Amino acid sequence: MGSAGWQAITTLMARRGTGVHLSIRITPAQLPNWSQFVPQLVKVDVIRGAVTAPASDRDIFSAPQTRVVKTWDVAGQKEMLELTYDLGRLDDGFHVRLRGSDGKRLAPGLNGSSTDPAGPAMDVVGNADQLQAELLTLLTSTPEVSSR
């Protein structure tokens, strides 16, 4: 169990053609954080991308087949909730990330709204109030699903 109270499978191996479902359970925060307020989870994104081959240049930040594939509005949820998403049949390797947000500062992602319609807005130099910053609190692990 992680320090935030969640578990993550980091790698799942399954036979090609197998149907894969993502199922997560989230218990919203009940206690104040270091800033003395209780974070409010408003939305959860599933981000999926292809696993193709090792990067030829690890300094290039590019994943052209990675995009937000599902967003749930979870505003106002006080009890544990379970979210499921059908990842489809496993034909090729892919990775999955989950992103939680309080929804305060959203903007289209770096690669446009077709890839990430409502991601965290970039901080403005000299105007980065940490108490108003977009709160990304759900998961920092990246579960990966691969085929053999």
Image: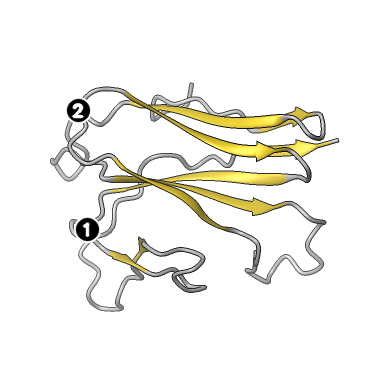
Image quarter for residue 65?
bottom right
Crowding near the residue tagged with mark 1, few <14, some 14–19, many ≥20 C-alpha atoms within 10 Å: few
Q: Residue at x 76, y 29 (%)?
A: 13
Snapshot quadrant of residue 29: top left
Distance from label 2 to label 1 (Cα)? 18 Å
Give the residue at the far left of this rendering: 36
Q: Position of residue 38 (x, y in %)?
A: 17, 38
Which of the two residues, 140 or 97, is positioned nearer the viewer here?
97
Indicate the secondary structure of the residue bearing disc 2: loop
Q: Measuring 19% from the left and 28% from the top, which residue is drawn there?
A: 78
Q: Against 125, is 71 above or below?
A: above
Query: Pointer 2: what residue?
Result: 78
Residue designated by label 1? 104
**Residue 41 drawn at (x, y percent):** 26, 41
The type of residue carrying mark 2 is Lys
Task: Name the side, left or right, on which 27 lies relative to 33.
Answer: right
Residues 147 and 128: in front is 147
How crowded pointer 2 is (Cα within 10 Å; few <14, some 14-19, many 20+) is rated as few
Residue 124, image x, y percentages? 29, 76
Instruction: Tell me the kind of residue under disc 1.
Output: Lys
